[in-house]
């Protein structure tokens, strides 16, 4: 087994929340290989920073660098969790997980699984029966088998959807081989099942978006150049960022991708905490089509595939424009070597139109201040789809989380002329896009002016005593326990939630707060009796609040791959119904997109924005941006030193 040359015993000077360096990953792997993971049959799934205890960090105590590792032993299919102390080399935990626990798939397993399908004689013969003989053009898309009530005897199983291209750069998604599924054991490489059912003709019309197929690009659009002649307004030291009044630390994990740590807003010279940690905790994409292949599609792209591992290396001018600061994402391959995803995280500023304006019509003067946002993002490719994840920080203390869903539909085939009621025909050749949802959950370890917070639900109410018939007011209801805090959005009540600190009072003696504006607050459409709903219970509701527990990290549990959903995740932890009043608490928000496929989503989908907002709500004593400068006069910016005289 090869061991990376960067093995070292020195870990250098880091902040305790900095992701593991390449050297630290190599060291953790070599310690495990010299110990319990000596056999060649071990596959590393992840080696990542074990974040130090928050109480220790807050107290400024010394912390040690530790790695959390997850491994699979291909010899017997058992999985393991380990903790390695990097300085001492001590393995402080080596735990065999229960039979059937399947950590996320690795990228190299995708390739190995596809290869197992491609060279399998039964698969080759069955495809030949369908007239498909060039195996190089066949794509076996490595989905997890998920869980549908069967006993998989602890096997690590990929359920390959199969597509065929006309030539290597032809889009496979135009040509699904419907009713043809290959199930592969990723530990043994064995094809365990071939499901070769009704021979629906493969749609032959192409669905390409490459210029060579589409034709010449239009020429009418003049360049837009974003220039910051004096450079960007952020300062970066290691993983620490300071921008406008904001400070935070950038993190990256294989499971979550981008993580924000210690997000604070400097107000009157004091750095006030808002979020201790925020990241995508899980997502699921369940399909509503009952066709046999489609009904089993539900991708937990974080917990089944480690979405951080699938982060793109971003390209200047394409993925982000302007004055960019990139951060690499460091992850692990199957043999424990560090893998650097260069430029995995992009950070830049964007103009964001006006922040505030008023024209004093009596004086004929106008004051306008422009907004700008700091964009911190990463983009992951999960086979067919791209998800671009953005945190936006604004000058007024607002925060936005946005997902741009793009890429290519996961398609299906029907007989030409048929009209599947659960999908949208994409052409007249049998290709259709089944209806589905993209559901996301973001975990936010709030710390609004300190660790002890409460959550209120704020609804618009019309009082019974309403003689003028005009009355409406906002009414706060304290959510006292975890069960009481399992909530759905209610747009008729203009519902939002406030995360407040009752020990920190604003100017008018109210608790300082941030509010969560629940945009895109949809819920899972699949019935409660479905397997996917039992596994993705986080998506049955929009708000969950838990008492902080460092082991509760991911909304559908630590290992949702092939799991039943019965013993881990938000719905299990909240059964304890812990007190969440004036406690260190974590807010989990589920939101999503109900993807009713349209023709315009083909052959590549224009981005759909999905997300939510966090806004200061009595956190500041007034608009915190009065000190913004007027926009300076330039040829194409309206401005005047003494105020504008037009509006
Ligand atoms: N979107 C499901 C998926 C993710 C990664 C690899 C294959 C399939
Ligand atoms: Cu979609």
Image (tube, rainbow, N blue to C red):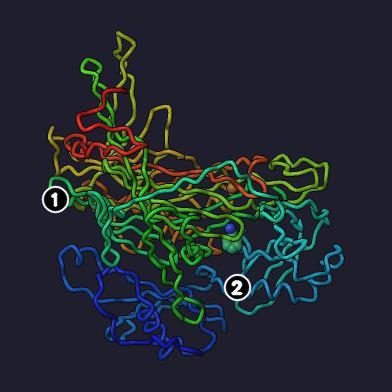
The residue carrying mark 2 is 155
The residue carrying mark 1 is 270
In x, y percent, where is residue 416? 83, 45
Say above or below: 286 vs 552.
above
Q: Residue at x 79, y 51 (%)?
A: 205
**In the figure, is residue 194 to the left or right of 14?**
right
- When asked about the image quadrant of residue 193, the answer is bottom right
> Is residue 409 or residue 121 the one in the foreground?
409
Alpha carbons under labels 1 and 2: distance apart: 54 Å
**In the figure, is residue 421 to the left or right of 300?**
right
In x, y percent, where is residue 357? 28, 29
Q: Is residue 535 visible?
A: yes
Which-is-in-front pick, marks 1 and 2? 1
> Is residue 204 or residue 541 the one in the foreground?
204
In x, y percent, where is residue 172? 71, 59
> Is residue 255 or residue 531 the one in the foreground?
255
């Amino acid at each position: 087994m090869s061991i990376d040359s960067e093995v070292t015993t020195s870990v250098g000077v880091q902040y305790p929340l900095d992701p593991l360096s390449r050297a630290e990953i190599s060291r953790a792997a070599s310690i495990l290989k010299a110990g319990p993971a000596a056999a060649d049959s071990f596959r590393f799934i992840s080696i990542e920073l074990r974040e130090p205890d928050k109480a220790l960090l807050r107290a400024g105590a010394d912390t040690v660098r530790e790695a959390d590792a997850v491994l699979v032993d291909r010899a017997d299919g058992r999985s393991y969790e380990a903790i390695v102390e990097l300085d001492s080399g001590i393995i402080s935990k080596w735990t065999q997980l229960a039979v059937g626990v399947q950590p996320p798939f690795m990228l190299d397993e995708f390739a190995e699984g596809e290869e197992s399908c491609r060279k399998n004689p039964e698969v080759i013969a069955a495809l030949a029966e369908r007239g498909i003989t060039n195996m190089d053009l066949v794509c076996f898309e490595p989905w997890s088998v998920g869980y549908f009530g069967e006993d998989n005897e602890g096997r690590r199983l990929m359920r390959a959807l199969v597509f065929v291209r006309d030539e290597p750069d032809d889009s496979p998604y135009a040509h699904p081989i419907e009713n043809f599924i290959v199930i592969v054991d990723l530990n043994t490489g064995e094809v365990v099942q071939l499901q070769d059912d009704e021979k629906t003709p493969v749609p032959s019309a192409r669905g390409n978006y490459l210029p060579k197929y589409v034709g010449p690009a239009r020429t009418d659009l003049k360049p837009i150049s974003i220039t910051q002649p004096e450079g960007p307004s952020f300062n970066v030291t290691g993983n620490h960022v300071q921008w406008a009044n904001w400070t935070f630390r950038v993190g990256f994990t294989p499971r979550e991708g981008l993580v924000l740590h210690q997000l604070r807003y400097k107000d009157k010279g004091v750095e006030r905490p808002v979020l201790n940690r925020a990241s995508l905790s899980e997502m699921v994409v369940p399909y509503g089509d009952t066709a046999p292949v489609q009904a089993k599609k539900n991708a937990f792209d974080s917990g089944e595939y480690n979405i951080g591992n699938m982060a793109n290396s971003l390209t200047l001018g394409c993925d982000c424009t302007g004055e960019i600061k990139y951060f690499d994402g460091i992850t692990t391959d199957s043999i424990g070597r560090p893998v650097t995803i260069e430029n995995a995280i992009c950070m830049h500023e964007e103009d964001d139109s006006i922040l505030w304006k008023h024209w004093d019509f009596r004086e004929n003067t106008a004051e306008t201040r422009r907004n700008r946002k700091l964009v911190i993002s990463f983009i992951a490719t999960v086979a067919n789809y791209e998800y671009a994840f953005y945190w936006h920080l604004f000058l007024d203390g607002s925060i936005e989380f946005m997902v741009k869903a793009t890429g290519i539909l996961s398609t299906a085939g029907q007989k030409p002329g048929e009209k599947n009621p659960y999908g949208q025909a994409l052409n007249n050749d049998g290709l259709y896009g089944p209806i589905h949802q993209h559901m996301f959950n973001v975990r936010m370890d709030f710390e609004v002016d300190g660790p002890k917070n409460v959550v209120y639900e704020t609804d618009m109410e019309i009082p019974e005593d309403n003689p003028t018939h005009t009355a409406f007011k906002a009414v706060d209801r304290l959510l006292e326990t975890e069960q009481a805090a399992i909530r759905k959005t209610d747009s008729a009540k203009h519902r939002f939630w406030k995360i407040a600190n009752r020990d920190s009072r604003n100017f008018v003696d109210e608790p300082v707060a941030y509010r969560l504006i629940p945009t895109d607050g949809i819920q899972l459409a699949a019935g409660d009796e479905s397997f996917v709903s039992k596994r993705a219970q986080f998506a049955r509701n929009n708000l969950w609040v838990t008492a902080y527990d460092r082991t509760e990290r991911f909304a559908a549990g630590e290992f949702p791959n092939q799991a039943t959903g019965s013993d881990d995740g938000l719905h299990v932890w909240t059964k304890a119904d812990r007190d969440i009043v004036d406690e260190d608490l974590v807010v989990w928000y589920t939101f999503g997109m109900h993807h009713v496929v349209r023709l315009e989503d083909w052959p590549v989908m224009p981005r759909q924005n999905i997300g939510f907002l966090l806004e200061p709500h009595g956190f500041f004593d007034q608009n915190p941006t009065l000190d913004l400068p007027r926009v300076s006069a330039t040829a194409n910016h309206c401005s005047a030193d003494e105020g504008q005289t037009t509006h």
